[in-house]
Amino acid sequence: METINQIRAQFSALQQQVYGKPLVYFDNAATSQKPLTVLELQQRMSSGINANIHRAVHKLSADATELYETGRDEVRKYLGADSREQIIFTSGATASLNLVASSFGHQFLKNGDKVILSEAEHHSNIVPWQIICERVGAQIMVLPVNIRGEISVDQFSEMLDEKVKIVAITHASNVLGVVNPIKEIVQIAHSKGVPVLVDGAQGIIHCDFSVKDLDCDFYVFSGHKIYAPTGIGILYGKKELLEKMPPYMGGGDMVDTVTFEKTTYAPLPLKFEAGTPNFIGAACLAPALQFASSVRQSAEIKLYEREMTAYMIKELENIEGLTIWGNPSNRELKIPVFSFTVEGTHPSDLAQLLDKMGVAVRSGLMCAEPLIRKFSAVGMVRASLAPYNTKEEIEIFIAGLKRAIKMLR
Ligand code: PLP
């Protein structure tokens, strides 16, 4: 497909060979490759526009600040948020989740309160809540997923009582690749006055949405999974909540005035951006999200992604003894993230053999140990696709997988 070839040409990392074989990069849910526009801006800033932001009057600092704030504008647009004050730069989804758990928890959680998480959460959306719940004496309630990897909205409704103070749920699971009914969850939670945080680490890549339409109270994601560099992430939040929440970290740039007696804080978003941020990473979100937008707006690429997903499922289902985890009844809700186990083989052996064939996949617990254990697995293999992956690569992967299974049985 011509469009896909044009896209591939923008990703130099995809042109390389590993062990003398063309790289088949199927670990996109862990981190994506970066297009040339991102690499060029990263290089241009590192080598030329390298000055601390918001602080100095000189030209270089003004230029770096402008690029940093352009990154914020681009994120606001991509998320469909109302204002730039709602867009906070962090170091990644994990940092954003810790920020909310700690700051929201400090302000709004007390002994006996409850936090609802789904069973399909990444450790980054479990552990920060455990830390704050332990500190204040609150309790975590777990919304289960069924064998297909779906949550039940009715079950969720039943769990909501007056003790629940927040719901934190993934937009799409990094293991199951199943998109959750976030809009319904938000509507139900809001009918009881409970805010909802959405972990968008995977959803940001594959779901077409706006935070205004979802009406969620917080949305978090990492830049590196959506074509930007590592070390930059986003917390979107509703202003009325962010304004009530105390700062998470103290330091430069987040203050209004400082005396030894009392400090007053800068307005949003700077209140939550203490210290020198990853200004190059933030600036690079602009070209990264411009690329992601062009993909998101292309009907041709959307159709291509659906066809690739269907093809992958068909090929995997044909392998004897293989179980795919995450099979929503509505196939539209499956993103191209395929975790599976194969009878008589260990996931890490399969991943190692595939690696030697030039195919990069993830294996293990995938930072979602409770979910993997629920399905009585020691781990899983995960192949995750991006729009730059091709049908030919799926064929190489499937042939390699069949060979690896034969070698191990
Ligand atoms: N949440 C989900 C669903 C993820 O897939 C990931 C990363 O794999 C994270 C959170 C954490 O992201 P990061 O490690 O970039 O902070």
Image (cartoon, helix red, strand yellow):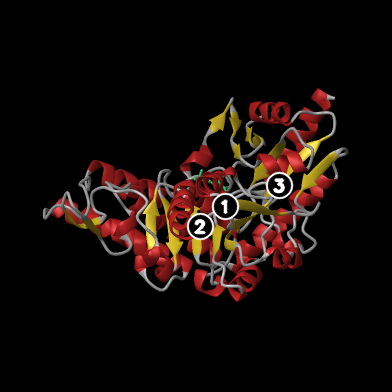
Residue that badge 1 annotates: 138
Of the two numbered discs 2 and 3 in the rendering, the one whose residue sits closer to the viewer? 2
Kind of residue at disc 3:
Phe
Residue that badge 3 annotates: 338
Q: Residue furthest right?
A: 320
78 is higher (above) or lower (below) than 226: below
211 is higher (above) or lower (below) than 94: below
Q: Quadrant of residue 83?
A: bottom left
Q: Give me the residue at 61% from left, 40% from top.
A: 367
Q: Give me the residue at 35% from left, 61% from top.
A: 72
Residue that badge 2 annotates: 109
Query: The residue tagged with tag 1: helix, strand or loop?
Result: loop
Q: Answer few, some or many: residues within 10 Å of disc 3's Cα (few below 14, many 20 plus, some between 14 and 19).
A: many
Kind of residue at disc 1:
Ala
Quadrant of the image for the C terminus? top right
The reply, left or right, for residue 40 in relation to residue 349 is: left
Q: Earlier in the sequence, mark 2 or mark 3?
A: 2
Q: Are marks 2 and 3 in contact (CB under 8 Å)?
A: no
